[in-house]
Image: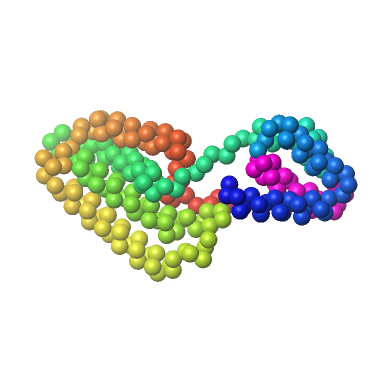
Amino acid sequence: MEPEKLQTLQAENVQLEAKLTKRNEQYIFDLKKALKAANLTEEQTITALNEMLPTLVEEQKTGKTARQLFGTVSERLDAIVNKPVEKKKSTTASLMWLDNFLLLFGMLGIVSGVMGLFVSRGTQPVTYGITALVVASAIGGIVFYMMYLFVYQYDQPGADKSKKPKTWKTVLMLASVTLVWFLVFNGAALLPATLNPILDPIVLVIVSALALGLRYYLKKRFGIISSLASAPRK
């Protein structure tokens, strides 16, 4: 945490502690001693107290004590020390694009492969060539990321909605890149077989499934946010 933000939290804690009743003040005093004995850093201590004090100051107006709200000092210490580590979320452009690429490649490939399995031999193949799939997934990944950049990131908690582009600009930009995506995808599908080889449908399904599996692993490993994800509705 940045030093300036930490100082701000500490200043808030001091102000809030000054409003505590004697009993709650003693509770916080004992908790601080317990946190120090547990070798928590200054940042961890300040953050933990800042999560408690606003609630404590508000609830004590109704006669509630810190012990009633947070349990004994030992119980609160255990809750702080063993608090689950929040997984970091990644909005790195390259990782989000890769996530989109693997998703599109996996879905398009599986659909294309499954359709190819049910086409009679000697008929016009409906399976997309590997080049067309890669190109479509790569450009589609950019389109999906732009949707996040112009729309969905502003649905996230704490987002600065004042920076959200005008609706007409967003529509124009997304419509343009989607049109380019459509044209390039269909253009790539018209390439000769030497430049756009068609895989055996079963092989294509397997490769596509592996792509989705890799996407799942990377999402867990790096906490990649989905480009089309918005904040949960309450």
Q: Residue at x 27, y 54 (%)?
A: 181
Residue 79 percent location from the top left of the image: 70, 34
Q: Magenta segment, which residues?
A: 42-64
Residue 211 percent location from the top left of the image: 33, 35
Q: Residue at x 45, y 42 (%)?
A: 224
Q: Please give the count of numbered marks on the rendered protein.
A: 0
Residue 212 appears in the picture as rendered: yes
Q: Is residue 214 left or right of residue 8?
A: left
Q: Quick one: 203 or 158, which is closer to the camera?
A: 158
Residue 82 percent location from the top left of the image: 66, 32
Helix, strand or loop for the magenta stretch, by majority: helix
Which corner quadrant of the image does residue 109 belong to? top left
Residue 88 percent location from the top left of the image: 52, 41
Q: Residue at x 15, y 33 (%)?
A: 121
Residue 55 appears in the picture as rendered: no
Which corner quadrant of the image does residue 219 belong to? top left
Which corner quadrant of the image does residue 105 belong to? top left
Q: Is residue 144 left or right of residue 11?
A: left
Q: Quick one: 11 or 222, which is closer to the camera?
A: 11
**Residue 54 in magenta?**
yes
What sort of colour scheme is used for the picture? rainbow
Q: Is residue 92 above or below residue 77?
A: below
**Residue 47 in magenta?**
yes
Q: Residue at x 83, y 50 (%)?
A: 20
Q: Quick one: 224 or 137, which is closer to the camera?
A: 224
